[in-house]
Image (cartoon, rainbow, N blue to C red):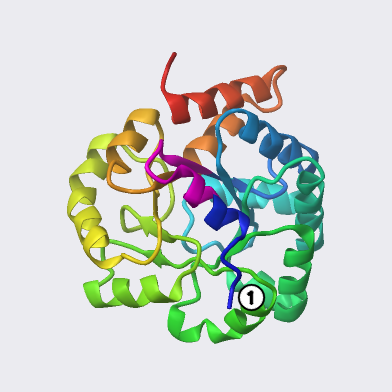
Amino acid sequence: MIKTDNRISQLFERHEGSEKIMSLFLTAGYPDPEATVDLILGFEDNGVDMVELGMPFSDPLADGPTIQYSSNKAIEQGITMAKIMEIVERVREKSDIPIILMGYINPVLRYGVERFCQDAAKAGVDGLIIPDIPIEESGILSDQAEKNGLPIIYLVAPNTSDERMRKIDKASQGFVYCVSVTGVTGAREGDEVAQSVQRFIERVKANVTHNPKMVGFGIKSHEDAQRIAADMDGFIVGSALIDTIREHYPEQGWKDEVFAFVRDLKYGKR
């Protein structure tokens, strides 16, 4: 069994009944490998509770243009799975922020599932999100993940049936990732998300009862996050963060602009 006292479970226990947990998605190696480490450490100082570190892949079928762009840039700069592990190790020298590796199964298979899980655990990774592995096929990863104490976090979406939500809830460990809209990743207009998300949230509340619930896809502001995550344990932001990095990097003071955006996401304009 996955140990229940890892950083993810501890985070949710600490935040039970308090402010919403904020998780950010950042592509490993973007905007450059050195900056990735600095950003993660700075995120924690500016209110981020958890980080999803994306494993770049050349054929990211669930990602919109923003994350595709960041993945391509990271690959161009020579990011590899081994270097991703090094990034986590360097963060771990200074921080205990929960880190989840998120990406597609192909790079994991190429690296080797057993080696991947062993190296991830050794580096200090706290969990895995592999969106293109349905629970019926998760055996190719789950045995080694469990052996190395790595919870696998599964996703539900508006087109997930109630029965399947309950099945995913039982299979997930850490939390359930609630994809608020169908389609690829990307920041969307708040009204578009709000109109489609409420019925989905009600269904999630009724069917996902064993795990904390984090909602993501389409959130780009504090107002979006508070509205969409009102009945969730927290929210996840990816594309809007990468858009902000892309807008300011490599200008002087670009990290300050990114951290100001992060603070606004968590706390609102002050």
Which quarter shows the N terminus? bottom right
**Closer to the camera in the image, 33 or 135:** 135
Q: Residue furthest top?
A: 270
Compared to residue 158, the image places residue 98 above or below, namely: above
Residue at the image point whose x is 57% and y is 68% from the top = 151
Q: The C terminus is located in which quarter?
A: top left
Horizontal arrangement in the rendering, residue 17 relative to residue 108 (left or right): left
How far across and how far down the image is residue 65, in percent?
50, 48
Expressed as whole percent of the image width and height from the top left, the position of residue 5 reads 60, 61
Q: Nearer the viewer, residue 47 or 221?
A: 47
Residue 44 lies in quadrant: top right
- Total numbered circles: 1
* Residue pointed to by mark 1: 145
The stretch drawn in magenta includes residue 13: yes
Q: On the picture, is 177 further left or further right than 190?
A: right
Q: Amino acid at mark 1?
A: Ala
Residue 173 drawn in magenta: no
Residue at left 24%, top 73%?
A: 161
- Residue under the image location 40 percent in, 49 percent down: 217
Other-residue count near label 1 (Cα within 10 Å), few / some / many at <14 / 14–19 / ≥20: many
Residue nearest the observer in this picture, 134 or 79: 134
Q: Position of residue 146 (x, y in %)?
A: 62, 77
Image: magenta residue range: 11-23
Looking at the picture, how far across and down is residue 248, in whole percent? Answer: 62, 24
Tell me if residue 137 can be seen: yes
Which corner quadrant of the image does residue 201 belong to? bottom left
Q: Is residue 79 visible?
A: no
Q: Is residue 206 above or below residue 198?
A: below
Residue drawn at x 69%, y 17% as measured from the top left: 253
Q: Quick one: SS at disc 1?
A: helix
